Image (spheres, coloured by chain):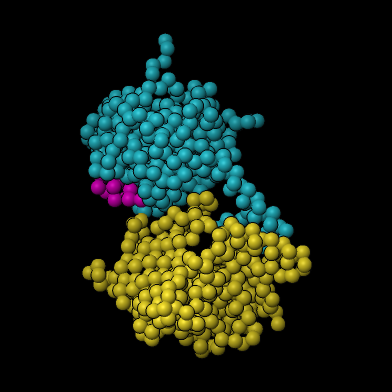
Amino acid sequence: MMLNVGVLGLGKMGKLHLMNCKFIDGANVTAVADASERNLKWARSRGIDNVYGDYTELIEKGNVDAVIITLPHFLHVKSGVLAAENGIDVFMEKPLANTVSEGETIINAVNKHGIKFMIGCNCRFIDSIERLKGMYDNGILGDVEIATLENIGNGPFSPFLEPTPVPDWYFDPDEAGGGAFLDLGYHMIDLFQWFFQDVALEYVQLGNRYNLPYEDNATVILKSNKTSTRGIVNLGWFSRSVFPKFDFRVMLHGTADFASTDNFMPNIYLNAVKEGLRSVWRRAARRKIKPLAYTYYFYSYFKELNHFFGCVENDDVMWISPEEALRTLEVIEEGYGMARGHDA
Amino acid sequence: MPELKTTVSLSKCSEGDVKETVFEAIEKTNFEPKKVNSVIIKPNLCYYWDASTGETTDKRVVSAIIDYVREFCNPNADIRIAEADATAMKTRHAFRMLGYTDLAAEKDVELFNLCDDDFKEIDIEIKGGSLKVPIPKSMINSDLVINVPKLKVPRRIPLTCAMKNLFGCIHDPIKAKYHPNLHEVIVGVNSAIKPDLTVVDGIVALGKYPIKLGLVIAGTDSLAVDFTAAKIIGYDNPRRIRYIRLAEKRGVGNLDVEIIGEDVNDIRKQFPKLNTFLFSLLWDLQLKGVKIYTTITGDIVPPVLGDL
């Protein structure tokens, strides 16, 4: 079955998902929506003529079966609910919403209208994370008492080699909903929840190196009520890091052994050559390539989207449930409340 | 009459004495304080990266310059800290994120986006013709213009210091369009804007990586300052840098330089030299490799590389 797909929002993530769809059987991007004429022109140049300046029009008139929502955070609730009301399946970039209340509104609409829904948490699909999860699930590490999760980068700020403007909404706390804790914390809390389940917040400390109207770094302590594992999470948007450097890791300290995703990260240049040659060979043999496998990290975005469309097609259960997506947001909102308490 | 030597001073500071070092560095130059009413100070705030990365001007240096102007020129002078929007940077965000909004409030000075200023178009000679470049009038008409660049090697050209920082004044956010004629435009802009004083923030300089040099360079001639900076970053002959050669040829500045204060060679040994030619070559090769690969296989270019 071929699904007609609409992409709402053609920022970097929207463009990436659109391009990834070309490699997914059963997903055909037939419509896009973006407020920028430049981005619509970009879509037209890639053969998509059904373009909209207003995303609500795409949902209501675009004749699509599923949408990929990569709109600014503050538009998630309206777009998500409207898609659900129109019976359209939704893949939505994290975070679920800016507040728990908005998140509940989305999940209620999803449940009421029985659509398929998944939040994009690509970190679950990174090869090194999958391998670490395999070790943990197989008991190789024993019981994990402490987990350390770190994700430090430049957030919405571009690396210096390719400077690009940061969208204005990112500087507005009402529209962005928060800073590094919401943006990167969403990934890391989701990972902790996936590994250990029943996540609860123990402590949070927010920092602001850059005088932004929200935090640009955070240290968080989580706890699993199921396994008693404690998670120490360090997050930051303050680093002028340069691709392909990647300040991201999960370390598990277990009763039997310890392991880190760093142990599974390949040399990024050797990986690029290896995967690049594989793709050339596959192309020559008229086989499918693994899009962006040569970058290591970005291949995870294809995998999550492929998983979503696979679940839609086969009516399978998504890896990331709406309830998990909401729970992650609840922990973050509780954290913001706790941080305000520190300030007071 | 032969042109007089111009002095460039090198002074070292520690964390706590930035103000004293800036004062000392200025006092060793040819700069003669005079009574002024309008003052414009141009730091390098090229993007939203902290001074500790070596990318942007440390606000403590600008703070010290404000104190110097108030003490030696006019306590009531109208002082503006100015920067122009760039391709990816908006001054209103940069001022706040890099601490200049707080500094302006503390020192009672104005923050000014040069893209909001009136401008004058100048003709810059380039290969095969000329190019019109808009220059903010404040950078020309203010009583006192102080340039406060960063000492860095930004990978695409051999040196960013005094003269390149004035390229950042151009009254047009899309500065990338001038990059094909970068050296000519740098020289052209410096023909139009003649700062009375340049104070370089080399407290954290940027070469192959950021380095705490604790250095303040000062001078009254932008070309002479860049000549000195080029020696620090590793050039035995700074005329190998095209815009320095071009500026000398066009009479933009004085290369009869007397360097006083710290020993250039001592500082040079500390500077983490970056081979910009090799860096650019390797980077371009990688981009070309990705482009060829994606053309052959139909694979995707990652978002961090933009539209190749």
Q: Residue B217 at what x, y percent from top left? A: 35, 33
Residue pictured at 57% horizontal, 64% vertical: A296
- Shade representing chain A: yellow
Inspect the magenta stretch and tell me whether residue B79 lies in it: no
- Residue B83 visible in image: no
Residue pictured at 54% horizontal, 88% vertical: A113
Range drawn in magenta? B98-109
Observer-nearest of A103 and B221: B221
User: Eyeballing the image, is A283 above or below A240?
Assistant: below
Residue B270, quarter of picture: top left
Q: Quadrant of the C terminus of chain B?
A: bottom right
Q: Quadrant of the N terminus of chain B?
A: top left
- Shade representing chain B: cyan
Observer-nearest of A298 and A63: A298
Q: Residue B278 at what x, y percent from top left? A: 57, 42
Observer-nearest of A331 and B73: A331
Left or right position of B78 against B250:
left
